[in-house]
Image: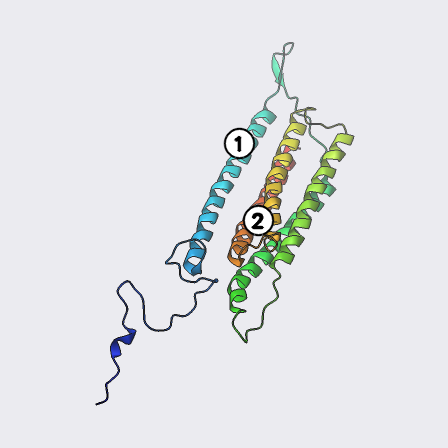
């Protein structure tokens, strides 16, 4: 007598398994039960959210730092030295002749670099989905361009720092130094602090550019570029803020 096939072969196993064929997980995952170590779409998203949360805390602390500098700047600009003869406070604030042309060129370089790093971020997101799929027979591999755009951003970032150095040198030639007066002190303080934080972004960009040589997974490369891109956008906005404060100085 013929035996009818059991219809319970596709029922879930105790513990959530299934006797049917399990499709491969995206992002190169091989299961992992939601370990959160970057394997699988769920783990990738969790890891990305953690890094973005850390970035938010970093951005918040930088904003507070620049707000503190601005508050000190406004308070010092309104202060002055006491003149015993007149009994009044005389302002000792001497405006700094800003190297406007260099600063505007630096601004353009930073804005263009912000556009390029956004292109790199979006390309990395696409690659994180399509590169694992290219291992399937018959699927043509895609050209990975995210690292190329990231490298171009890195070059422009170093160009911006070189432009800042040129601006500082021009001020030195005009006789304005860090301790020359309160106005020049705040100029070097604001631009120098911004340059240090931008250099930190360059370190992150270099890490992303070397990801392939370091044999990092496509997911980690995507996370590195995503977080660095948002940080880079923030530094571009902060530079425009610094320019506005410097203009207020004069």
Binning the other alpha carbons within 10 Å of mark 1 as few (below 14), some (14 to 19) or many (20 upward) gives few
Q: Nearer the viewer, residue 161 or 190?
A: 161
The picture quadrant where one finds residue 70 is top right
Relative to 131, is 71 above or below?
Answer: above
Residue 160 rendering spot, x and y as whole percentages: 68, 44
Residue 52 rendering spot, x and y as whole percentages: 47, 49
Residue 10 rendering spot, x and y as whole percentages: 29, 74
The residue where tag 2 is placed is 233
**Outermost residue toward the bottom?**
1
Alpha-carbon distance for marks 2 and 1? Answer: 21 Å
Residue 29 rendering spot, x and y as whole percentages: 45, 62
Q: Nearer the viewer, residue 33 or 236?
A: 33
The picture quadrant where one finds residue 120 is bottom right
Quadrant in which the N terminus is drawn: bottom left
**Outermost residue toward the top?**
85
Q: Nearer the viewer, residue 199 or 13?
A: 13
**Outermost residue toward the right?**
173
The type of colouring in the image is rainbow
The residue where tag 1 is placed is 68
Comparing marks 2 and 1, which lies closer to the viewer?
A: 2
**Is 194 on the left-hand or right-hand side of 61?**
right
Which element type, helix, strand or loop, lies under badge 2? Answer: helix
**Outermost residue toward the left?**
1
**Is 245 on the left-hand or right-hand side of 10?**
right
Give the residue displayed 52% in from the left and 65% down from the top. Answer: 132
Which element type, helix, strand or loop, lies under badge 1? Answer: helix
């Amino acid at each position: 007598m013929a035996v009818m096939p059991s219809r319970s072969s596709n029922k879930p196993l105790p513990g959530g398994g299934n006797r049917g064929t399990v499709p491969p997980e995206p992002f190169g995952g091989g299961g992992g039960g939601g370990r959160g170590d970057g394997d699988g779409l769920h783990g990738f998203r969790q890891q990305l959210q953690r890094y973005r949360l850390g970035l938010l805390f970093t951005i918040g602390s930088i904003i507070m730092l620049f707000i503190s500098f601005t508050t000190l700047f406004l308070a010092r600009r309104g202060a002055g030295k006491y003149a015993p003869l007149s009994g009044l406070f005389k302002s000792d604030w001497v405006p700094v002749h800003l190297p406007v042309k260099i600063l505007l060129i630096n601004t353009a370089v930073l804005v263009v670099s912000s556009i390029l790093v956004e292109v790199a971020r979006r390309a990395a997101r696409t690659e994180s989905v399509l590169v694992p799929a290219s291992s399937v027979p018959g699927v043509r591999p895609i050209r990975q361009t995210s690292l190329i755009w990231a490298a171009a951003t890195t070059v422009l970032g170093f160009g911006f720092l070189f432009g800042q150095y040129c601006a500082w040198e021009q001020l030195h030639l005009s006789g304005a130094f860090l301790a020359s007066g309160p106005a020049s002190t705040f100029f070097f303080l604001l631009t120098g602090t911004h340059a240090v934080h931008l250099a930190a972004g360059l370190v992150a960009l270099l890490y992303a550019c070397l990801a392939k040589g370091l044999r990092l997974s496509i997911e980690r490369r995507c996370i590195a570029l995503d977080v660095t891109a948002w940080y880079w956008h923030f530094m571009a906005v902060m530079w425009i803020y610094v320019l506005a404060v410097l203009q207020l100085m004069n």
